[in-house]
Image: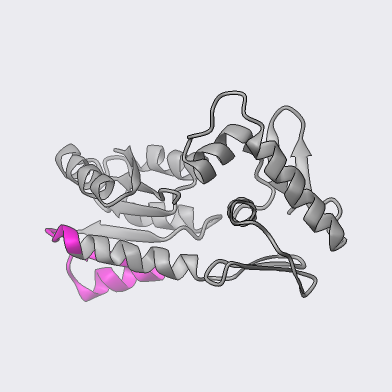
């Protein structure tokens, strides 16, 4: 099973290290940024499944980070804050935060809230034109007709459809779908992509899957 990635944007290294240990033990891959700007860059480049965001960052307020993220991303954001007022909570939710946890917090509560956000995100149907993917039922339809895929083909398509137009390298696909266990020089990714392309073509999905020579694969946005 693919390990989901969480980005922790927190300038307190003690708190960040505790979060890293707790989340790693819970089965997540964890990235860390200690400034708002570094966090925004990592969010754009690494595409985490969820962000834990401290409000009191050294360069600018965490609320501004939420606003900037929401310009081009729907990634779930859980705010970590000591500001326990109704006005502040309303402000954060209005800016686009998905949830908030008041400091100090119990690790089990935070983990439960993370799982709720990821479960909600994972159950949403994903669409791209005539292509529809239901993660919960593991069902794919193209122009209303079911597309029968192998488990790995489904996982690859689910990866690509979440960010249409983004080119994923063979190494990124191998890391995400096979957790980096493919040997060097393996053509397993290419074989699965060829099979996926053929199945899409059978339903007149010509050109939906794009190959960028020497780089990787993408779904046309």
Res 83 → quadrant: bottom left
- Viewer can see residue 82: no
Does the magenta run of residues contain 178?
A: no
Locate residue 76, reporting x and y percent.
42, 61
Kindly identify the residue that appears in the image at 53 percent across and 45 percent down: 177
Locate residue 118, reporting x and y percent.
40, 63
User: What residue span does the magenta drawing correspond to?
Assistant: 82-108
Vertical relation: 27 (above or below) 114: above
Viewer-closest of 49 and 194: 194
* Render colour scheme: one colour
Res 31 → quadrant: top left
Kindly identify the residue that appears in the image at 77 percent across and 44 percent down: 210
Does the magenta run of residues contain 96?
A: yes
Vertical relation: 130 (above or below) 33: below
Taking the image as shown, residue 100 lies to the left or right of residue 139, namely left
Locate residue 164, reporting x and y percent.
67, 52
Kindly identify the residue that appears in the image at 76 percent across and 44 percent down: 194
Viewer-closest of 155 and 123: 155
Vertical relation: 4 (above or below) 91: above
- Viewer can see residue 194: yes
Locate residue 126, reporting x and y percent.
61, 66
Residue sitting at the far top: 184
Kindly identify the residue that appears in the image at 65 percent across and 45 percent down: 166
Res 32 → quadrant: top left
Viewer-closest of 135 and 90: 135
């Amino acid at each position: 099973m693919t390990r989901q990635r969480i980005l922790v944007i927190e300038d307190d290294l003690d708190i960040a290290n505790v979060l890293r240990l707790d989340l790693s033990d819970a089965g997540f891959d964890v990235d860390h940024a200690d400034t708002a700007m570094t966090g925004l860059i990592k969010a754009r480049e690494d595409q985490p499944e969820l962000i834990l965001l401290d409000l009191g960052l050294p360069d600018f307020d965490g609320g501004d980070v939420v606003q900037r993220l929401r310009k081009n991303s729907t990634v779930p954001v859980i705010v970590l804050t000591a500001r326990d007022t109704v006005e502040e909570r309303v402000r954060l939710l209005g800016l686009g935060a998905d949830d908030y946890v008041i400091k100090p917090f119990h690790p089990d509560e935070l983990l439960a809230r993370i799982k709720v956000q990821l479960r909600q995100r994972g159950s949403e149907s994903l669409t791209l034109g005539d292509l529809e993917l239901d993660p919960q039922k593991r069902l794919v339809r193209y122009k209303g007709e079911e597309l029968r895929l192998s488990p790995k083909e489904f996982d690859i398509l689910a990866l690509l459809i979440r960010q249409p137009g983004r080119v994923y390298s063979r190494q990124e696909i191998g890391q995400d779908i096979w957790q980096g266990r493919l040997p060097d020089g393996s053509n397993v990714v290419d074989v699965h992509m060829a099979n996926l392309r053929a199945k899409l073509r059978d339903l007149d999905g010509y050109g939906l899957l794009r190959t960028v020579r020497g780089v990787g694969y993408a779904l046309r946005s």
